Image (cartoon, helix red, strand yellow):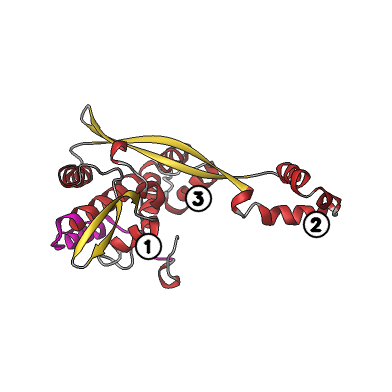
């Protein structure tokens, strides 16, 4: 679990009643912006199970009401590590003499290099999901969007950055909140709840609904935008209940 304290690392995934209790606690926040913002954040995480950066980087333009649905387009940023051959090409250009090292040493140095910023490339992909406008979580998201449109008409991001200036909170439209900042919005409401748990919850929801079947693997992979079927299968292993054939 991302940034989970050791004591909470193995906690059970939240049930619907825990999410609703967290939202009810959010209703007590007096500041309208803070109240609507955290409820929209929880709703997005609950409904779509996306990574926190994928939620944090959402722009207002990424949300659209169309044909009875709320369409949300997420930007996925996936790291692809560069290969050994690409490392050799870099050395050939920047430090040719280094290629004279033993192959085992070069491979070890390559393994260290791919963990650096220079050793991987980031590929961006766009994925659109939709949910009925009547959905209770969609309503909370749209309520927050309406507040932003009315009170911050020049906004770019759904969760813009900001800072407190004396007793006033100033929205900074040029940047969005980071993943750790989003986490800090939820913690006062439920200290044992973090954003990755919503992702785990969504995967478990599909696995329990579809059972121990290949279709569950495919649905989890598509919903969570996973790269590998093996990762999706782990959700099925953890949460799916195998149904035995009846005998009469």
- Range covered by the magenta-colored residues: 10-33
State the separation of the CA atoms marked 1 and 3: 16 Å
Residue 222: % across, % down: 43, 38
Residues 61 and 195: in front is 61
Earlier in the chain: of badge 2 and badge 1, it is: 1
Crowding at mark 3 (Cα within 10 Å: few <14, some 14-19, many 20+): some
Residue 27: say if magenta.
Answer: yes
Q: Which mark is residue 66?
A: none
Q: Is residue 97 above or below residue 186?
A: above
Which residue corresponds to the image point at 24% horizontal and 50% vertical from the top-left?
Answer: 40
- The furthest residue to the top: 67
Q: Which residue is mark 2?
A: 105
* Image coordinates for residue 14, horizontal then vertical, percent: 32, 59
| Alpha carbon distance from label 3 to label 2 | 35 Å
Which residue is disc 1 drawn over?
12
Q: Position of residue 123 (x, y in %)?
A: 52, 39
Question: In this rendering, would 159 be left or right of 94?
Answer: left
């Amino acid at each position: 679990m991302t940034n989970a304290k050791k004591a909470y690392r193995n906690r059970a995934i939240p049930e619907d009643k825990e999410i609703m209790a967290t939202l009810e606690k959010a209703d007590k926040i007096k500041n309208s912006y803070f109240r609507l913002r955290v409820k929209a954040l929880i709703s997005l995480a609950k409904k779509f199970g996306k990574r926190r950066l994928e939620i944090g980087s959402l722009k207002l333009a990424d949300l659209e009401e169309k044909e009875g649905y709320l369409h949300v387009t997420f930007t996925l940023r996936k790291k692809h590590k560069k290969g050994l051959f690409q490392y050799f090409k870099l050395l050939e250009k920047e430090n040719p003499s280094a290629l004279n090292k033993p192959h085992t040493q070069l491979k070890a140095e390559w393994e260290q290099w791919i963990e650096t910023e220079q050793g991987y490339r980031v590929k961006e992909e766009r994925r659109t999901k939709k949910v009925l406008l009547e959905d209770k979580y969609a309503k909370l998201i749209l309520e927050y969007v309406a507040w932003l449109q009315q009170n911050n008409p020049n906004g770019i991001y759904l969760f813009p950055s900001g800072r407190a200036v004396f007793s006033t909170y100033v929205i900074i439209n040029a940047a969005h909140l980071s993943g750790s900042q989003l986490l800090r919005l939820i913690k006062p409401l439920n200290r044992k709840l973090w954003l990755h748990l919503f992702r785990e919850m969504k995967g478990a929801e599909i696995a329990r609904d579809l059972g121990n079947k290949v279709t569950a693997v495919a649905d989890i992979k598509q919903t969570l935008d996973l790269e590998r079927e093996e990762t999706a299968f782990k959700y099925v292993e953890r949460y799916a209940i195998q149904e035995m054939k009846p005998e009469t």
